[in-house]
Image (spheres, rainbow, N blue to C red):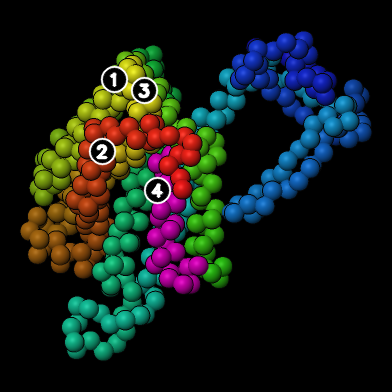
Amino acid sequence: MAPPIRKIDISKNCIPEYGAPAGTRGISLFIVPKIWVNEDGSLGGPNDVACTGVEHKLGLHDCPTCSLTLGGKGQCRGFLLGNENQGMKIMFHMMNEARLDVGAQGFSHASAAYLYALDYARQRLQGKDISGGKDAQDQAPIIRHPDVRRMLIMMKAYVEGMRSFVYYVARCFDRKAVSGNPEEQARWSAMTELLTPVVKAYCSERGFDVCTQAVQVFGGYGYTQEYPVEQLLRDCKITSIYEGANGIQALDLVGRKLSLKNGAVFNDLIQEMRSTIQLARSRKGLESLSAEFETAMNGLVEIAGILVQKLGLKDVLVALAFSHPFMEIMGDVIMAWMLLWRGSATQPKLESIAGGPDLHQISSAVQTDRNAAFYDGQVKTAEWFIQTILPVTMGKIQSVKAGCDAAVTIDEKPFGGL
């Protein structure tokens, strides 16, 4: 049974008995009404709460935030929520869910930005179609230009990878909910713990990157308020900051989540990836992609072990300095996993429509069948990400293995400044 709500005078101290433990251990949560309600249910006078300033933000203009002063006149009252000194524990019930929501928010911004950019690129006429050679006369939609297509496939890859990633974590929650086996429930609960900081941090950062590319596709128009992508860019930025800044998420990932159950949870995730590798190996045309993905996955496993080992040594500061790069690496590998998974699921359907694996047959089917075009897009997107982004990820892996300590050994005064 939940503890009763108690009315507290919070104008002098945040707990009634004073002497709370120092730091976060002494935090309590309160519900502070704007208008006090009398014992008989009638409305009383206003509580001692004052707005001292409205914040002017880069984005999220439809969500006003402000600074409040509680008890400026010494007459503020509130209700203690839960038990005293349990504020942080209670708050994290909300925070963990909110972090998943923020990751989904970053993905949602990216999805909208991508669709706006794709629609614009199909309509905007500029320049000649390079494939038409010197004889090209009419202006072409910018989607025919190679660099625009590069930006669009990058956006497509991240949007589809993030969508599957967010859905996968939601599926972990579902598996926990429907399972009657306590061991299975614990397994999927631990998996969500491991992946929550990655969903929040990676999806918020890549979501912002996708919004940036959308502005680039629109060109100068994208920088104006006449078109929607500039608002998506502004609104998306906050996702890497609130509900726990991404640097904190990365520290949590390396400092706590990798070692859950002595690393068994992380190993369980890797086994999930290995299952997809086995599936991809059975699909004609995906064999090499599965091998390239496996190389990156093994690199992730290797540096995870290196960082966990450093945490137990005097190199702990170096390990934590590489926590954010590690989070990005883990996110990249998860994106490749999700895209390879999607490609493995759709390849047989593509061949079924085309009548076989012959590239000429597939090309013809793509031109005449919308489903075939969609399935081919899944395979091509996985191919692009694994062969274009994962090589960069492998470079990041090498940098973590090298373990440069300059970030933590540079002099703080003046931190190498002029």
Q: Secondary structure at mark 1?
A: helix
Judging by the rendered image, the residue that carries numbered circle 2 is 399
Distance between mark 4 and mark 2 Cα atoms? 21 Å
Task: Identify the mark nearer the N-term, 1 or 2.
Answer: 1
Q: Nearer the viewer, mark 4 or mark 2?
A: 2
Image x and y of residue 228, in percent:
52, 64
Are dots 4 and 1 in contact, CB under 8 Å?
no
Judging by the rendered image, the residue that carries numbered circle 3 is 316
Q: Secondary structure at mark 2?
A: helix
Q: Which mark is residue 88?
A: none
Task: Identify the mark nearer the N-term, 3 or 1.
Answer: 1
- The residue range painted magenta reads 200-223
Left or right: 14, with 194 as reference point: right
Judging by the rendered image, the residue that carries numbered circle 1 is 309
Quadrant of the rendered structure where residue 13 is? top right
Q: Secondary structure at mark 4?
A: helix
Q: Nearer the viewer, mark 4 or mark 1?
A: 1
Which residue type does callout 3 highlight? Val
Q: Residue at x 44, y 64 (%)?
A: 215
Judging by the rendered image, the residue that carries numbered circle 4 is 206
Task: Identify the mark nearer the N-term, 4 or 2.
Answer: 4
Q: Nearer the viewer, mark 3 or mark 1?
A: 3
Image x and y of residue 27, in percent:
66, 20
Q: Residue at x 15, y 42 (%)?
A: 292
Left or right: 331, with 363 as reference point: right
Q: Secondary structure at mark 3?
A: helix
